[in-house]
Image (tube, grey):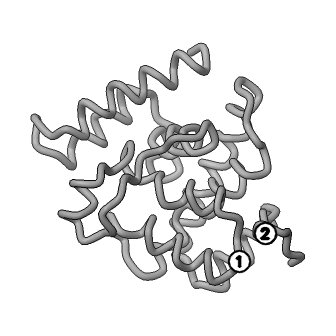
Amino acid sequence: MSKLDMGLIPTEEQCLKLLEKYKTPEKSIEHAKVVTELVKKLVTKVSVKRKIAIAGAMLIDIGKTQTQGLKHGFIGGRILRKEIIDESVISIVEKHIGVGITKIEATRAGLPPRDFVPETMEEKLVSYADKLVIGTYVATPKEAKIEFASHFPPDHSALKRWDAFMSEMRNILGE
């Protein structure tokens, strides 16, 4: 793998090698492949750095080598920093959880006290695709919301963020 000045933006093949190197669970790899295929379709609708979005989509769950929980995005970021992966790809991995985690929620979850909310179009696009893929099934937005909502009490702030985020993305993508 050749290194770039700011870090490596790995190809899909290099991403698969990283996932295998860290013994990422097969179901997480299969999920990432479906998310990546959806991202490839969506990148035609918006102006994004395609290579970065695809690498981020492939690597979103590399942190599941150590945990299946909320912290897998942060752990994935740590793993990828050791591999000298570009920060733009790492940021996608760290911020794809839910529809973002606020600084307060991050602190409560034992993460560093900072926002883990998608900001760049690449981060948003991968997070959007990830939310629509349940396992290896590409769900409708309605199905995806039901799945997402099943993890929270009805008044949780993440549900309001979900509605705003999904609405923003549907508008951007013209869906």
Q: How many marks?
A: 2
- The image quadrant of residue 16 is bottom right
Neighbor class of circle 1 (other Cα within 10 Å; few <14, some 14-19, many 20+) is some
Q: Are marks 1 and 2 in contact (CB under 8 Å)?
A: yes
Residue type of the residue flagged with mark 2: Leu
**Where residue 8 is drawn, which disc sits there?**
2
Neighbor class of circle 2 (other Cα within 10 Å; few <14, some 14-19, many 20+) is many
For this orientation, the residue located farthest to the right is: 2
State the residue at coordinates (86%, 78%). Answer: 1
User: Where residue 111 sits in the image (x, y, percent)?
Assistant: 31, 69
- The image quadrant of residue 30 is bottom right
Mark 1, residue position: 84
Residue type of the residue flagged with mark 1: Ile
Per the image, label 1 sits on a secondary structure element best described as loop
Q: Which tag, 1 or 2, sits closer to the chain's start?
A: 2
| Structural distance between the alpha carbons of marks 1 and 2 | 6 Å
State the residue at coordinates (38%, 42%). Answer: 99
User: Where residue 22 sits in the image (x, y, percent)?
Assistant: 59, 84
**Image-based side of 128 in relation to 12, left or right:** left
**Where residue 141 is drawn, which disc sits there?**
none
Q: Is residue 23 above or below residue 153?
A: below
